[in-house]
Image (cartoon, helix red, strand yellow):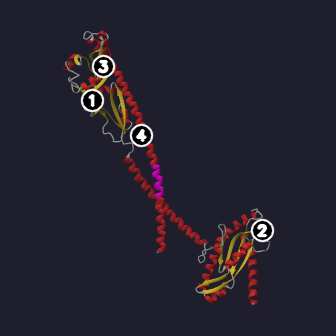
Amino acid sequence: MSTINKMNSKLLAKFLGVFLYSSLVVAAFIGIFFKFEYDEKHRLTQFYGYVFSEEISSQFYELSRDVMPLYTLISINKDESGSFNSTAQKILISRPEIIALNLAKDGIVSHVFPYEENKKAIGHNLLEDEARKVESLRAKDTQKITVSGPFHLRQGGVGLAFRQPIYLYPDDKEVFWGFAIAIYRFPEIIKKGVNFTILSNAGFNWELWRKDPASGKRLSLLSSGTLDKDFRRFQINLQNATWWIDIAPANGFINYKKLFIIIAASIVFCVLLSFIFTYFSSIVSRYNTIKSKIHVDDLTGLYNKRYFWETIDAALEKHLSYSYAADEPRLFICVMDINKFKSINDTYGHVVGDKILIEFAERLSNELSANEFASRFGGDEFVAVLYCQNQAEHALPERIQIIKQHLEGLYCINGNRLDVSVSLGALSPQKYMLSQKPPNLSLGEFFLEQVDKVMYSEKYSFHAKDKER
């Protein structure tokens, strides 16, 4: 049960690891995508803000020129009435959006055209009217043409006024004469010159506004509808006045609805990805477990005979084709078994014999480097592939002698102190030996047979000495 729990814990850890990593990667991509989208929307907002503020400013400049003939009529020609109607009619023909053209001597409307539609404005004192005087006094004091409004007209409708202050200079003295005024229908006049549908079609909401000159409060002039709180504001410099246009993407600079959908979809994707990865990882893990069991000896944990035969030929071919330097370790095949192992089993039982094999395998494993391996061939026989310095021919390399010493000695098993000795044969395969290889044997089979002869020679010597004792 604990093994199952351990496996489940590993799978859960893999699942969480993949989910966390994939979530971080996806979050980074989402961040990059929305940062790009935010920057692009901001860039477009700046572009449209600049374009539309410039268009409105240019349009108002053109409109401000309409009143100049009336200004010239008074300031240069000194003609207060004689030519007013004919001059105003010519202006109206060229600019039909004009509601009225006025002269306001001393700030009081004295002449209007067309008369019938605008006669109610006669006598209107612009310098005293609470809704008009701030902008009228600004025009008078600055001596600059001034945009006023939009506001409700006495004669009806909503108008936008351009007031041109007129000063005369009798006897070299500056005297305020009054205003020349052009009044336009609003918002028709601005809609004709500026196509706000471009903004809406591009996916932006907007609002054109100004401050009330009397109260300082915000007055909305035109808008596309509800404006998001996160907007960009652009100042529009007009004739002696300032308006503003606020612009924001219809879905906001960050589309939170879209962001939520993408995040939700990403979470589902990461969960599925983690599940799929964990599922296939478990399959690979099971496959590797099964594969390792095919190649691993159940008792000792070393490789088994099958692994040795699958590996040795490639290792030998590489060894025989490699040009070793004089001081470079060479490949050695070592065959070893435990002397009198059968009598140990007969005397102490197979449980003790198995534990000796396990400890023997542990001692052997501790001697192996990364590119070396050992296999249990069965019973008490083991084969190892080692890399050792080649010493005098037919002499056992010093490293293998040390390994043999570490494998031998006392084994304390279940309270029994057993003195274990090992027979070991080792050989570094050489090309000249191949002339003796029968055609029916593989490289591994041939050289293992040669090493076996060396090992059994040592084993024969051990038994001979044992009999003498």
Q: Nearer the viewer, mark 2 or mark 3?
A: 3
Q: CA distance from mark 4 to mark 2?
A: 75 Å
- Residue that label 4 marks: 41
Q: Nearer the viewer, mark 4 or mark 2?
A: 4
Q: CA distance from mark 2 to mark 1?
A: 106 Å
Q: CA distance from mark 2 to mark 3?
A: 113 Å
- Residue that label 1 marks: 213
Q: Residue 164, labelled with which disc?
A: 3
Which amino acid type is shown beneath numbered disc 4? Lys
* Sequence-earlier tag: 4 or 2: 4
* Sequence-earlier tag: 1 or 4: 4
Q: Position of residue 117 (x, y in %)?
A: 21, 19
> Do the residues bearing badges 3 and 1 touch, measured as CB atoms within 8 Å?
no
Residue 281 appears left or right of 112: right
Residue 188 appears left or right of 359: left
The answer to whether 86 is drawn above or below residue 252 in the figure is: above
Q: Viewer-proximal residue, 436 or 251?
A: 251
Please tell me how crowded label 3 is: few (under 14), some (14-19), or many (20+) other residues with Cα within 10 Å.
many
Q: CA distance from mark 1 to mark 4?
A: 33 Å
- Residue that label 2 marks: 430
The quadrant holding residue 392 is bottom right
Q: CA distance from mark 4 to mark 3?
A: 40 Å
Residue range (magenta): 20-30
Q: Nearer the viewer, mark 1 or mark 4?
A: 1
* Sequence-earlier tag: 4 or 3: 4
* Sequence-earlier tag: 2 or 3: 3
Q: Position of residue 107 (x, y in %)?
A: 24, 19
> Do the residues bearing badges 4 and 3 touch, measured as CB atoms within 8 Å?
no
* Sequence-earlier tag: 2 or 1: 1
Which amino acid type is shown beneath numbered disc 1? Pro
The answer to whether 29 is drawn above or below residue 410 in the figure is: above
